[in-house]
Structure formats: structure tokens, C-alpha cells
Amino acid sequence: MVLSENDLQICFHTALGLVKEAGLHVSKAFHSMKSVTLKTGDIDLVTETDHFVEALIKDALKAKFPSHKFIGEESGQDKPGLTDDPTWILDPIDGTMNFVHTYPSTCVSLALWVDKDPEIGVIYNPITQELYAAQRRRGATLNGFPIRVSTQMDLTKSLIITETGTSRDEAKMNVVKANIATLLPKVHGFRMTGAAALDLALIARGAAEVYYEFGLHIWDMAAATVIIREAGGVVVDTSGGPFDPMSRRIIAAANHELVNQIAPMLRQIELERD
């Protein structure tokens, strides 16, 4: 389905309004007592606010765009695969563990993909009131001001962001630790914030040069992909090949030169697709 420029503008402003509305609920609940349940393991958490925000945004999108599809983290089995149809992709609270601990790195991440390509991405941290937004071919912004990736091309002078993820499978953890051990002597440093969408947004704003991770889901990456690309960066597979949003593997970098330096050093993890 082809969306006109006017259609996309309506979608973009709808997305902005919805993440801001959702952010009010997230910030209100941030310092409150939370009802926490487990999903796939002891450190894979979900709260009542995750469910509330997802329902809020999903219902609003279904009412305004009834022909569009929807993929959300908390939607259980109601997860259609990514098709050519206009598809909204939502992480209602990225960084749920941070949210539970009142660590202020948490956000609402909402994207619109059409023909399996990202058209719109919005990431909002209501605690710091940082709003990242992008439309394809229209640039990326932070709170309305243009952002660009770093100009650094030397991995040894680069700041790297990654996460350990929620899997505690011993074989996977060994690869995670091995990759950090390999890279640490060859880079400026490592950072982990606990929220993949915000990690990726930091690449877009030029605060770090490379992000890589194994084990994410499409809702972690969907909005940030267009934001990074519109800020001048690149998004690829951890092997350095073309990015597949359903593969659960990603390198996001300021440029291809950094990808070419880091990708050969990464031990790969094969994961079940989304």
C-alpha cells in the first residue's frame, strides 16, 4: 500500500501526539508502586503501565487507521509478521527494568513501516523529556532541533554501546562476554543504559559511535532505524550485511567505516526470528 505525503504527515503528527500522551502516564507511574510480572525469565519484566500504554496507543491507531497493521511488545500472540502493509510497531516502555527501578533511561518507542521500510520513528523519554523523531527523507530531530551522527571514523577513538540482554543462556552469555573482551582494548569505552531504543538514539545524536546487540526484537529497533538513517548513520546486521528487522541482530553506527572495523571482530549468535 502506498501512502501519500499527506497521509504520512498525518501519521507522523498522530505518532507525536500519542507518545506524548503515553509519556504522561509513564512519568506519573515512574515513582509509584508498580505491579511487576515476569515474561520469559526472572529479569524479563512487564508492568501494568506497559500494558496500559500499549492498549492506549493500539486502540487510538486502530480507530484512526483501521487498515493499518500493528506489532506491539505486549500483544501476546497477536503479532502479525512484517508485511508490505502499513504497520505500526510499538514498544510501550523500552527499559522496563529501568522503569521498575526508577532509573531514568526509559522510553516509549513508536514506528510506522511501509513496504518493509521505516517511514516514521518517534522515541520519547518522558522522564528527561527528550523526544527523538524522524520521517524518511525529512531528517531527524531531538526536541525539534536537527541531529547528526558523529564524524568519527576510527574505532579506537569510538564509544561503543551494547547490552547484555535478558537471556542468561550460558552459551549466549559466553559470546556476549567474549565480544566485550575482544573490543574493550580497541575502543575508547563501553556504555550500557538498559534501554535499546535510547541506546540507538544516542548514536543518532552523535553521543556514541557504534551500537551492537544480539537478541533484540523488532519493536526495540523499529523507530530508531529511521532516526539513525535520517541523522546520517547506518543500520546493518551484526555480520555487516543488510539489516533484517526480524533477525534480532543489529549494528548501528555513524558510518560504514566503523561497521567494517567492528563487524569482523564480533562472534555471532544465531537467534530465533521474530
Image (tube, rainbow, N blue to C red):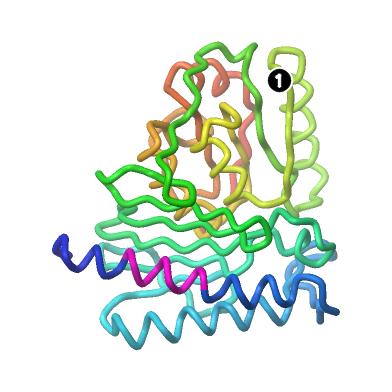
Membership of 19 in magenta stretch: yes
Above or below for 250 versus 4 = above
Looking at the rendering, the stretch of residues picked out in magenta corresponds to 12-20
Q: Position of residue 123 (x, y in %)?
A: 51, 57
Q: Quadrant of residue 185?
A: top right
Q: Where is residue 84 in the image (x, y as percent from the top left)?
A: 25, 62
Identified by mark 1, the residue type is: Leu
Q: Nearer the viewer, residue 32 or 225?
A: 32
Q: Give neighbour class at mark 1: few <14, some 14-19, many 20+ (Cα, 10 Å).
A: some
Q: Where is residue 103 in the image (x, y as percent from the top left)?
A: 80, 56
Residue drawn 54% across the image and 49% down it: 248
Residue drawn 62% across the image and 19% down it: 158
Residue drawn 55% across the image and 59% down it: 124
Q: Quadrant of residue 199?
A: top right
- Give the side of residue 45 with respect to residue 255, left or right: right
Membership of 216 in magenta stretch: no
Which residue is disc 1 drawn over? 183
Q: How many labels does the image show?
A: 1
What kind of element bears circle 1? Answer: helix
Q: Quadrant of residue 112?
A: bottom left
Above or below for 35 versus 214 = below
- Give the side of residue 65 with respect to residue 226, left or right: left
Q: Give the position of the N terminus as an image quadrant.
A: bottom left
Prevailing secondary structure of the magenta residues: helix
